[in-house]
Amino acid sequence: MKRVKDAFDERAAALDGLLGVGRSFDMIGRTLRIGGRRARLWVVNGYADDTVLERAISAWLPIPSLEDVGTLQAFADRYVSVCDATVETDRLKAVTSVFAGKTLLIIDGFSGGVVLDAKQFPLRSVEEPDTSKVLRGSHDGFGESVMKNAALLRRRIRDSQLTLESLQVGTRSRTDVVLCYMENRVDRKLLDQLRKKLEAMDVGSTAMSQESVAEAIAPPQWWNPFPKTRYTERPDVAAASVLEGDILLMIDNTPAVMLLPCSLFRFLEEVNDYYFPPLVGTYLRIVRVIVLLLTLFVTPLWYLLVKSPDTLRQSLHFLLIEDEYYVPLILQLLLVEFIIDVLKLASLNTPDVLSNSFSMLGALILGDFAVQARWLVPEVLVYMAFVAIANYAQHSYEMGYAVKLCRMVLLLLIWLFDWWGFIGGILGILALIASTRPLIGKGYLYPLIPFNGKDLWALLHHRPIDRNNS
C-alpha cells in the first residue's frame, strides 16, 4: 500500500511542478480526501467558478468508500455532477486544460485525472463593435471568449448542420480555435485545406490572436499589402456568411472572427447593405465602389494634371494652383499622408474627454497654420481631406491601408515618369492584385477569374432573399 501512496505523491509533485504551484500565486492546488483516499485538485484562481466547485466538492467529501469503484471513469459517471467532465490520461493535455481554465482532479489508486469545466472567465458585455455600426439590425457583437461567441452564433443558426470543430494551435499558448461551417454547404476541399494548415502550424505563441494565426498560415507574400482574409465582430455577418457556405475561424481571446474564403470582391459587401431594401443596398454598394476608386486615383490624377500646367486644357484650369508655395507638391502630398496617419495613431491614445479638443487643435495647427506658413497649399488639404474621409467608407482597415500604399507609390511614379509612371503604376497595381494569394479559395479575383457569372452578379448587387433557399 505504501508503494501506491508514493506513486500518488510523485504524480502530485510532478503536476505541481508543471502547473507552477508555489511559483504562481493564482495557481491553486488543494489536497482532499474522497472515499478514504487522498485526492488533489488544481485550478487557476481567476478562472474558478466557486459555486460550481463548492457543489462538486460537497458531493465528494461524504463518500464513504471507493472500493466498489473500479475505474476513474466509473467515479466520474457516478459522483461528478458537472456537465462537462472527462477522464484524461495524457498528462500534457490535462495540464493544458488547467491553463485553459478547467479543473483537474486526481485520486489515489486511479490512473489519469478528471477534467472538470468549472470556469468563469472575466468578460466584457456583449456590445456593438465601434467600427461596424448599423442603423437597423442587432446591436450585439462578439467578445473575447470563443465559447460565448459560439453561443451567439448558435442563437442565430438553429440547425443541426451547423458544425463547430475545435482545434488547438501554438506549441506554448495552446490557443483554442474553432472551425464553424454548415455541413451540407461547405466546400469540403477548402475545409480540409484550412484544417491541414492549422494542424501544420509551427509557432510557439499566438499572442496576437487572429493576426498571429493569419500570418502563420498565409502564403509568404509580406510585400503584398492586400488583405488575405476578412474579419468581422458582428454575429449577424458571421451567421450570414456561414449560411452562404463560408468557413468561420473563431480564435479565443479575440472578438475578430475570420471569414474564409476571401476574394477582392467580397470587400465590396458591408452589413448595412442588407438592412435596407435591395435597391437601396445596391446603391450603397455602388457608392462604396466609386469611393474606393476615388481614394486611389483622385490625388494622383490631380497631381498628374497640375504637374505640367502648360499642357492642361483650358476647361481644366480650375485645377491649377494660384497661390505661391515653397515645398514641392509631391512632398506636400506625402507629408499630409504621413500627418493623417500620425493623427490616427495619436487619436488611439487620446482620452475620450480630450478627443474633441484634439481634433480641433489638429485641424487648426496642421491646416490653417500650415497654409499661412506656405508649407501646404489649400488644394492639397482639400483633396487629402476628401481622401481621408472617404477612406472610412471602406470597413476593412487592411484594405484601406493597401489602397493608401498603392496611392503613395502611384504618386512617386508620376513624380518620376509623368504619364508613363501613371500607366505603369496602374498596371503594377493590377498585377499585384492578380498575384495575391488568399489563405484558401479559388483565387483573389474569383468570381471574375476563374469566371462565375452567377456569383459575380450576386456580389455586385444586393439580391432579394431566395424564398426557396432561405
Image (spheres, rainbow, N blue to C red):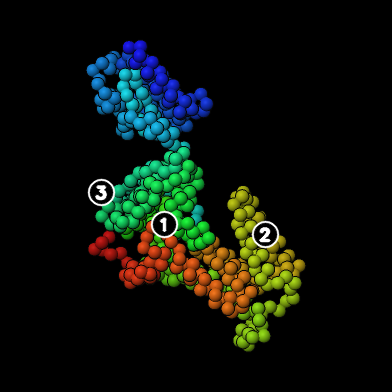
> Residue 74: percent from the left, percent from the top?
25, 25
| Mark 1: amino acid | Leu
Dot 2 alpha-carbon crowd within 10 angstroms: few under 14, some 14 to 19, many 20 or more: some
Residue 344 lies in quadrant? bottom right
Closest to the observer, 251 or 365: 251
- The secondary element bearing badge 3 is classed as loop
| Left or right relative to 374: residue 380 | left
- Indicate which label's residue lies in the foreground, 2 or 1: 1
| Mark 2: amino acid | Gly
The residues bearing labels 2 and 3 have C-alpha atoms spaced at a distance of 54 Å
Residue placed at 54% from the left, 70% from the top?
Answer: 296
Dot 1 alpha-carbon crowd within 10 angstroms: few under 14, some 14 to 19, many 20 or more: many
- Give the mark nearer the N terminus: 2 vs 1: 2
| Left or right relative to 292: residue 359 | right
- Give the mark nearer the N terminus: 1 vs 3: 3
Q: Which residue is mark 2?
A: 362
Residue 301 lies in quadrant? bottom right
Q: Which residue is mark 1?
A: 439
